[in-house]
Image: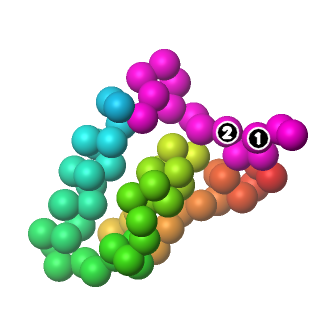
Amino acid sequence: MLNTYPHRLGPSGYAKNIPKWEEKVEQLHQAGIVLETDAWGTRTKHYMYARKAQLSDQESWLLWDLISKS
């Protein structure tokens, strides 16, 4: 079975990207933004970030790249 949504992390993989994701989440929390993803498991969040889903400053996901390529 093909992986419908492969990750797009490049050779650095998850290890080098997790700190970047955590930093972005922390910045949004410091700005007083409550994220929908706060209730999600770590694995779920990392899966989404690895597929170029991004958090916006308006408390929503930017999934258009992921959705438009399906």
Distance between mark 1 and mark 2 Cα atoms = 6 Å
Total marks shown come to 2
Disc 2 marks which amino acid?
Answer: Pro
Kindly check if marks 1 and 2 are in contact, taking CB atoms under 8 A apart as contact: yes
5 left or right of 38 in image: right
Q: Residue at x 25, y 41 (%)?
A: 19
Magenta range: 1-14
Q: In the image, residue 9 lies at what x, y percent? A: 50, 32
3 in magenta: yes
Residue 69 versus residue 45 in the image, above or below: above
Q: Say which residue label 1 marks.
A: 3
Give residue 25's quadrant in the image: bottom left
Residue 41 versus residue 60 in the image, above or below: above
Q: In the image, residue 60 lies at what x, y percent? A: 46, 74
Residue 1 versus residue 34 in the image, above or below: above
Q: Say which residue label 2 marks.
A: 6
